[in-house]
Image (tube, helix red, strand yellow):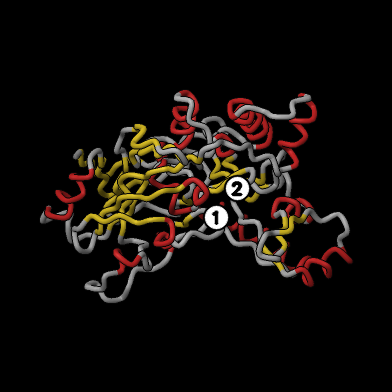
Amino acid sequence: MLVEKNAPLQACNTFGIVARAQTLVRVRDPLDLRAILADPELGPQPKFVLGGGSNIVLTGDVRPVVLKMEIPGIRLLEETPRAWIVEVGAGVSWHEAVVWTLAQGLPGLENMALIPGTVGASPVQNIGAYGVELQDRFESLDAFDLLTGQTFTLDAAQCGFGYRDSVFKHAAPADPQAEGASRGLGLAGRAVITRVRLRLPKPWKPVLGYLDLERRRVQAGIDQPSAQQIFEWVCDIRRSKLPDPALIGNAGSFFKNPSVTPEQCADIIAREPKIVHYPMPDGSIKLAAGWLIDACGWKGKSVGKAGVYDKQALVLVNRGQGLDSVTGGEVMTLAGAIQTSVYERFGIRLEPEPVVI
């Protein structure tokens, strides 16, 4: 393992916020975690797990030991009559994994192309896009328990997946001796994901439910698009709507799409007939957070160096550069102002997606 002191974090978060870690450890093998826990200096300290930094807002320097996950490796682990099982190291870029699977003739992840971040972080957020979520393609994962020093494996049920949610976002059991890891309960701050296994179903079927994809299919005049074609459509759509973090700092979609009851939705439609909404399988109605924000007039607006992207109101961006970058405080001030506007107009409370540190 490689230990760095007073390590700069600006290049480690896609918002490009200037901050430092008192101690940063580059984890390139699961065994590094055992060595960290056994280290007399590092072991007792609080830990913060960092993947691609695409879903965080840093509001200051980070005092806990930063575990920068860089475990490599991707392979076809198993093939059955019903699925391909692909195993990926936690440090592999998610998009890189999507590209690799398609290149190997293993379709199923194409709808989630260009989602930023690492594979190890994907179960935490239960990432998803264009009608497919990680839980739809998940087999199991390996993780390390920072309290007990034990490794363990979780299946989908134990991960407790929900909309942009999992057990990894909820507090650990109060009792350090509780077998929370084995039961998959409250693993925030406790579990470090080291490897993820993805289940790509056979036979492959295209997922084309989203309007943007259906429009592309109709425009192309293709009845049965290939996985590679869907991948290219998704990449093109995302690039047209979302800024490249390498050019404009951002953390992707900043707010979750809120869900309401059909009755609440009908009440809002009576006042706002053009509101974008989607019925969900459980009977609830999902509202487009970007539409709500745009309707409140925030698109293109700024607070300090934090701005609302002019092409997609759901994305907050860094309008600073280099050391004169946006601060985490500016980002959260803007986010709070947007939440207030949306609540006052629609009675809807928007919930941020990124983790605030």
- Residue 341 picture location, percent across and down: 73, 62
Q: Please name the residue shown 22% across and 59% down the image.
A: 45
Q: Is residue 39 left or right of residue 107?
A: left
- Residue 87 picture location, percent across and down: 35, 39
Q: Please name the residue shown 57% across and 44% down the image.
A: 252
Q: Earlier in the sequence, mark 2 or mark 1?
A: 2
Amino acid type at image mark 1: Glu
- Residue bearing mark 1: 353
Q: Residues within 10 Å of mark 1 (few under 14, many from 20)?
A: some
Q: Please name the residue shown 26% across and 60% down the image.
A: 46
Residue 347: tell me if it is visible: yes
Q: Is residue 84 left or right of residue 212?
A: left
- Residue bearing mark 2: 253
Asked if residue 321 is positioned above or below residue 270 in the image, the reply reads above
Amino acid type at image mark 2: Ser
Quadrant in the rendering for residue 88: top left
Q: Is residue 291 left or right of residue 66?
A: right
Quadrant in the rendering for residue 112: top right
